[in-house]
Image (cartoon, helix red, strand yellow):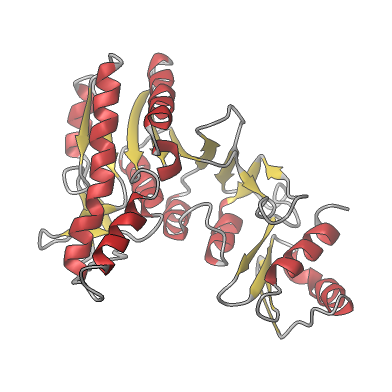
């Protein structure tokens, strides 16, 4: 069985992290699986490159920014391939264009249009592990393009679909998807599974655990995603389509600091509007605007009060 494993920047921040990630790949190989790796730029290297550019040019050409930023993932891919080879597992690194990832004709935040992973299949058939630089592809004109922040998630999902992989695993520094950001809400609980559509709504409403574009692609192809931690043995969270009877009434809460909103997600979220507005108003948190849809309730509050609203709603709706 083919398995795509994506490792985020925090999972590759130093040699110890890189070695741990390589170990997870080797475990899959020992189980008889065929791993395909997708890697992000290590640690904060992308931010460091952006800061370096700002010292040179306040408005750099978008094409050249793509050419620069893509090198972070390419470096991670080469280092991972070298590490795996050292541990006795032959591996080959690939840039996005070498892996057959074609994007629209755009620099910065381009969308994937096709995945033609012929060279990856050849590598697998040769008994080697392909290690793909995430976050990037190539335009029809032959220019390097990037997929926007979090785009390595989209690379992983696209390859899982194109290669008919049995699993798509995304490793990060959290041990699963929570009912709310556990850094802000102490009572947040880790979910064993969540509906793919609900997770997409959370991502579009401010959650940064998974890239929204990767979830749109997964939803279009009904591709399950396992969100796991590269630092613990926790079972993580399975993101997949759930039948109506298995979907919980409420799945999660998130916030968007720029839009000053808090969004409640789940099949019964819209039904909680009166309760949510009444609770916030009673705590001197007036709702400036409310919007609801098939699986969400979005409330706009005063700037700077989003976290207060998040905690109040979570305590009332998820912790009782």
- 159 is higher (above) or lower (below) than 272: above
Q: Quadrant of residue 175?
A: top right
Q: From this viewpoint, is residue 128 visible?
A: yes
Left or right relative to 300: residue 279: right
Left or right relative to 253: residue 107: left
Q: Quadrant of residue 197?
A: bottom right
Q: Provide residue 70's location: percent of width, then percent of height.
A: 24, 52
Question: Which residue of the protein is positioned furthest toward the bottom in this rendering?
Answer: 288
| Residue at x-position 35% and y-position 28% | 35
Q: Nearer the viewer, residue 251 or 173?
A: 173
- 176 is higher (above) or lower (below) than 47: above
| Residue at x-position 39% and y-position 25% | 19
| Residue at x-position 56% and y-position 52% | 196
Q: From this viewpoint, is residue 111 visible?
A: no
Left or right relative to 89: residue 230: right
| Residue at x-position 66% and y-position 68% | 263
- 13 is higher (above) or lower (below) than 113: above
Q: Nearer the viewer, residue 95 or 112?
A: 95
Q: Provide residue 305's location: percent of width, then percent of height.
A: 71, 74
């Amino acid at each position: 069985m083919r398995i795509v494993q994506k490792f985020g920047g925090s999972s590759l921040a130093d040699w110890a992290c890189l070695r741990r990630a390589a170990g997870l790949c080797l475990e899959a190989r020992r189980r008889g699986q065929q791993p395909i790796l997708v890697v992000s730029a290590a640690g904060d290297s992308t931010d460091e490159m952006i800061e370096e550019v700002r010292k040179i040019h306040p408005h750099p050409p978008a094409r050249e920014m793509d050419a620069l930023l893509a090198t972070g993932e390419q470096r991670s891919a080469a280092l991972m391939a070298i590490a795996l080879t050292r541990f006795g597992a032959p591996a080959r690194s690939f840039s996005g264009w070498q892996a057959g990832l074609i994007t629209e004709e755009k620099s910065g935040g381009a969308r994937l249009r096709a995945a033609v992973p012929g060279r990856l299949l050849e590598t697998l058939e040769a008994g080697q592990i392909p290690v793909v630089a995430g976050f990037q592809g190539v335009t029809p004109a032959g220019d390097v393009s990037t997929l926007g922040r979090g785009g390595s998630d989209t690379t992983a999902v696209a390859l899982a679909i194109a290669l008919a992989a049995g699993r798509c695993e995304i490793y990060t520094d959290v041990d699963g998807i929570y009912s709310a950001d556990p850094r802000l809400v102490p009572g947040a609980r880790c979910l064993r599974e969540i509906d793919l559509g609900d997770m997409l709504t959370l991502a579009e409403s401010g959650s940064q655990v998974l890239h929204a574009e990767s979830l749109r692609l997964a939803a279009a192809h009904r591709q399950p995603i396992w969100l796991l931690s590269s630092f613990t043995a926790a079972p993580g969270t399975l993101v997949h389509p759930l039948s109506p009877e298995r979907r919980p009434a409420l799945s999660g809460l998130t916030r968007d600091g720029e839009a000053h909103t808090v969004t409640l997600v789940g099949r019964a979220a819209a039904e909680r509007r009166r309760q949510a507005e009444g609770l916030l108003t009673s705590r001197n948190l007036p709702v400036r605007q409310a919007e609801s849809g098939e699986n969400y309730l979005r409330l706009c509050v005063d700037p700077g009060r989003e976290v207060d609203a998040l905690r109040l709603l979570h305590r009332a709706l998820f912790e009782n």
